[in-house]
Amino acid sequence: MSETTNTPTKYIFVTGGVVSSLGKGIVAASLGRLLVDRGLRVTIQKFDPYINVDPGTLSPFQHGEVFVTEDGAETDLDLGHYERFIDHSLSQANNITTGRIYQDVITRERRGDYLGATVQVIPHITDAIKSAVKRLAPNHDVVITEIGGTVGDIESLPFLEALRQYRQEVGREHVLFVHLTLVPYIAAAGELKTKPTQHSVRELMQIGIQPDILVCRTEHSLSDEMRRKIALFANIDVAAVIESKDVASIYEVPLLLNDQRMDEQVLEKLRLKTPEPQVEGWRELVHRIYEPSRGSVRIAVVGKYVALVDSYKSVQEALIHGGVASDVSVDIDWLSSEELDTPKQAERLGEYDGLLIPGGFGVRGVEGMLHAITWARENELPFFGVCLGLQAAIIEFARSVCGLHHADSAEWNKETEHPVIALMNSQREVIDLGGTMRLGAYNARIAEGSHAAEIYGRHEISERHRHRYEVNNAYRKRLAAEGMRIAATSPDGELVEMVELPDHPWFVASQFHPELKSRPLSPHPLFASFIEAAVRRRDSRSGNGEDQQAGQATREEGVPAAAGR
């Protein structure tokens, strides 16, 4: 980007109004994607107004997935969207909460850093917020910051005030505000209503922030008259009113924004010059999602938190990516493990082409997972275990195959006769729950001749973790003697990272979370291989040999983009 090398860093702030969960994170990520496709160096951060230091101790039912970064930060699930869209790994600096800001300020006050001054929201808290934005500027052309919550929330006010000040300090030509709002459709009146948007913008302007671009979430298209009305009340150009209709795939959003020239307007307002965006690869991605050439597969995800699918957001997206690699649509059924509490109930897995058991904590629902794994193992259903999924697979194998009928995890059964899953030595004296697990990226060594080595295409990998308990090394020889292969370990060989069953069509489990590193344009190899195994299972059940041969030809042509990680 020679044209922008000497240009000061630009800042885009994304706010939301009317109601929460409108998709600020997807809009921020989509805009970031378009700017990356123009050759700009982009990073994205999230400001969360809650007082928790991070979401690590929050219930998945309240806040959804905890996304773990390479450096081991437990962050908001929107950081997963950011990484997947801009194809760049983020860090702890990309997720700031009110709790972290106040923690930092109070720590400094206790050290005497403020020289006896009265510590106040302005300037001390707002200065800390501004520092968090400025910290990301080096080596980036554009910093996009999403502010959680909605305009009008009392807890968001310090963040908005800090950003108002920031625009004044760095210069208005270097800062742009994007406001996401809702234009609801009132069925009784048979029309869209702009009044909530008007009130939301007015609330923002009372704080001292004039939005530059409005993104309007809507179920129906905005008429030209409605766009003019919104622009008039919001004091912006008509072209700056961007329509964001509901779509079947979030990966279509960058294309919709590009079609309305949103990225061009951003560049114009920030005085940046770039080449046209190279979106062809992204268009091909969306085409594959909407019109796969090899049909669909059905995957059962048996988990503890399926009542809120956002609890497994990265798993959901990684399965979609795996489908893209195999050019199939992935139909996911979210099954509560508590509903599979007998072997008979597990027989419903015969309807599916693959089983995935994701991560989680605690004993609730584990028995259902064990029944599901038994059925998959005995009936050659492709099985993929992630974190708790691996631990459940170890327990099931120890009980059913090794004859250790009381095998269990010490996490929930400290008196078990056979603790095949046990606490790491480094965790035995830990009292605090937040940020104290095995977190972030760790290296692993894959065993020669293993299925895992074939999938990855190499023997040294790095994957992200979030757990405390490990496979108990005292039982490794017994598991191996009965046919379970330790497919990967930590570099020193002390910790089990992957297991597999060599005599099963596809039975692989990992202690790490591979979904956290899957990207739409480079699906994680484990997910790509799992979905391909599901395709084979589907074809073998239907006797569709021709499709199977076509799929093999497609793979030989190198279509799946799952390698090179």
Image (tube, rainbow, N blue to C red):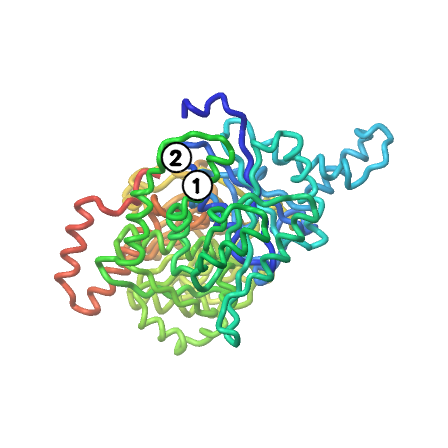
Q: Position of residue 528 (x, y in %)?
A: 31, 51
Q: Quadrant of the N terminus?
A: top left
Residue 452 sits above or below residue 540 on the image: above
Q: Is residue 437 visible?
A: no
Between the residue at mark 2 and the residue at mark 1, the CA separation in whole angstroms equals: 9 Å
Q: Position of residue 256 (x, y in %)?
A: 39, 51
Badge 1 is on which residue?
263
Query: Neighbour class for label 1 at 10 Å: few (<14), some, many (≥20)?
Result: many
Badge 1 amino acid:
Asp
Tag 1 secondary structure: helix
Say which label, 2 or 1, has the lower sequence index: 2
Residue 243 sits above or below residue 522 on the image: below
Residue nearest the viewer, comparing 296 with 208: 208
Q: Is residue 293 visible?
A: yes
Badge 2 is on which residue?
38
Q: Is residue 176 left or right of residue 35?
A: right
Identify the residue at image location x=50%, y=72%. Answer: 338
Residue nearest the viewer, comparing 23 with 336: 23
Query: Neighbour class for label 2 at 10 Å: few (<14), some, many (≥20)?
Result: some
Residue nearest the viewer, comparing 406 with 69: 69
Q: Position of residue 527 (x, y in %)?
A: 35, 52
Of all residues, the one furthest to the bottom in this rendering is 344
Badge 2 amino acid:
Arg
Q: Nearer the viewer, mark 2 or mark 1?
A: 1
Q: Is residue 468 left or right of residue 294?
A: right
Indicate the quadrant where residue 262 lies.
top left
The image shows a total of numbered marks equal to: 2
Identify the residue at image location x=77%, y=33%. Answer: 108
Residue nearest the viewer, comparing 238 with 323: 238
Q: Quadrant of the C terminus?
A: top left
Marks 2 and 1 close (CB-CB < 8 Å): yes
Tag 2 secondary structure: loop
